[in-house]
Amino acid sequence: MNHEKKHRFQTRVIHAGQSPGKWHGATLPPIFQTASHLHPTAENLSQTFAGKKTDHIYMRLTNPTNRALEEKLTDLEGGQGAVVMSSGMAAITNACMALLRAGDEFVSGNSLFMSTYLLFFNVFKKYDITPRLVESTDIEAIEKAINSKTRFVYLETIGNPKMDIPDLTRVAEIAHNNGLPLLVDNTLATPYLCRPLELGADVVIHSTTKYLSGHGVAVGGVVIDGGQFSWPKERFPDFEPFIDRKGPLAFLDKVWREHHINFGTSQAPMHSYLTAIGLDTLALRMEKHMENTLTVAQYLQKKPEVCWVNYPGLPDHPSHGIARKLFEDKGFGGMLTFGLKDQAACFRFIDNLQLVYHLANLGDCKTLAIHPYSSQYISFDDPTRENLSITPDMIRLSVGIEAHEDICEDIGQALES
């Protein structure tokens, strides 16, 4: 079903990519749980392998349920094409690897999810690939870090868990002036709050496990191509065959053909189906997530046990102004961090929670708390944790969509206990 721009996000998030006529009247894509697909003729299969047809061959390559989700996510982010993958980390890895060769460099903000940091500094370095880590919001530092070996700039829309917000428009200008694409992990913002492609970014990445799915039932990732970058030969000498084959979608073709299908990072059709169900309520959920998070942040500020609160929705937050500009006053995200006296106090707080869940996830409709320093980042040395703003006194809270009174009451009793 084709929906034009006149339809608002709240409508498109439900109707984009819908094809009831092809699905025997179903309003959700069927789960095509099949390893491979029958072809009527040898010529048909040959043309499909050659890329002249878009029929399905084998689940590791494409799948009809996955394609329906790809079409919806492409529409929501304003891109030209997408590939869903088995996890957010699969999406980050494949997108980056499609642009990198031995000896290359890239510039990244220092506000990074734990596994992203390990990928950049532990895995990529084994292949002589050098990440240049700079302050995410320091425009001059980003520009200064670019050199002839740089292949892209990488940022998170809202840093996890640093909660800083870079000026994507200005960074995109700097990247493009240097012949580079801007890659943005938009997981925490979601396309409801921010669409980086409309701000100048070239590629958007999500862990669909988080807010897009929203219920803690499906794991997945997606790479969405804006289709606007020209891929100059001096920086991307191996792009020519992909440009010849797919034109504006050369990058996505390279991601899919070189990495996704050869690394075997296929999305399970059931997970695409569950993500599609979750997306129907994304707009409503994000409104409630953000309303609750601001309320919780303001509540925490009043508690004597709390030493500090870090949420872009608070007027004194360093990223408050840029957040209002980029997010057009729709909100400030559904996650915050706050500080207690020390690690022991954090442990006591978590152990006393009764409603809030203690687990390693975010973006769920349920409120979730974790002590990152002693869990996700336990293998990191102290200088690295400090550089990533991971401190012993910090609690990360992904605020759910429960009644805000109940969330605050549970936090209050855990603090007082």
Image (cartoon, rainbow, N blue to C red):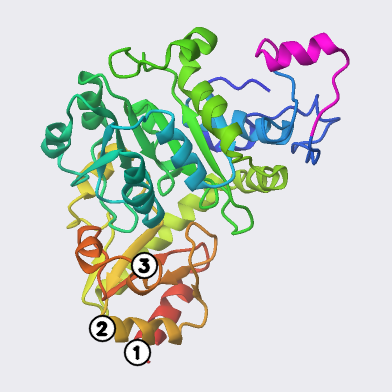
Q: Do the residues under discs 2 and 3 have CB atoms within 8 angstroms?
A: no
Tell me the distance, in whole angstroms, between the alpha carbons under discs 2 and 3.
16 Å
Q: Quadrant of residue 200?
A: top left
Relative height, residue 122 to residue 407 (above, below): above
Q: Which residue is mark 1?
A: 416
Q: Residue furthest right?
A: 40
Residue at x 37% of width, y 57% of height: 114
Q: Do the residues under discs 2 and 1 have CB atoms within 8 angstroms?
A: yes
Q: Do the residues under discs 3 and 1 have CB atoms within 8 angstroms?
A: no
Tell me the distance, in whole angstroms, between the alpha carbons under discs 2 and 1.
8 Å
Q: Quadrant of residue 17?
A: top right
Mark 2 vs mark 1: which is more N-terminal? Answer: 2
Q: Is residue 38 magenta?
A: yes
Residue at x 45% of width, y 41% of height: 93
Q: Which residue is mark 2?
A: 305
Q: Amino acid at mark 2?
A: Glu
Residue at x 45% of width, y 80% of height: 410
Mark 3 vs mark 1: which is more N-terminal? Answer: 3
Helix, strand or loop for disc 1: helix
Q: Which residues are magenta?
A: 36-53
**Left or right, 345 with reference to 54:** left
Q: Amino acid at mark 3?
A: Arg
Q: Which residue is mark 3?
A: 396
**Left or right, 34 with reference to 115:** right
Residue at x 48% of width, y 36% of height: 94
Q: Amino acid at mark 1?
A: Glu
Most foreground residue, 366 or 242: 242
Image quarter of the N terminus? top right
- Expressed as whole percent of the image width and height from the top left, the position of residue 228 reads 39, 17
In this rendering, the count of numbered labels is 3
Mark 2 vs mark 3: which is more N-terminal? Answer: 2
- Expressed as whole percent of the image width and height from the top left, the position of residue 224 reads 49, 30
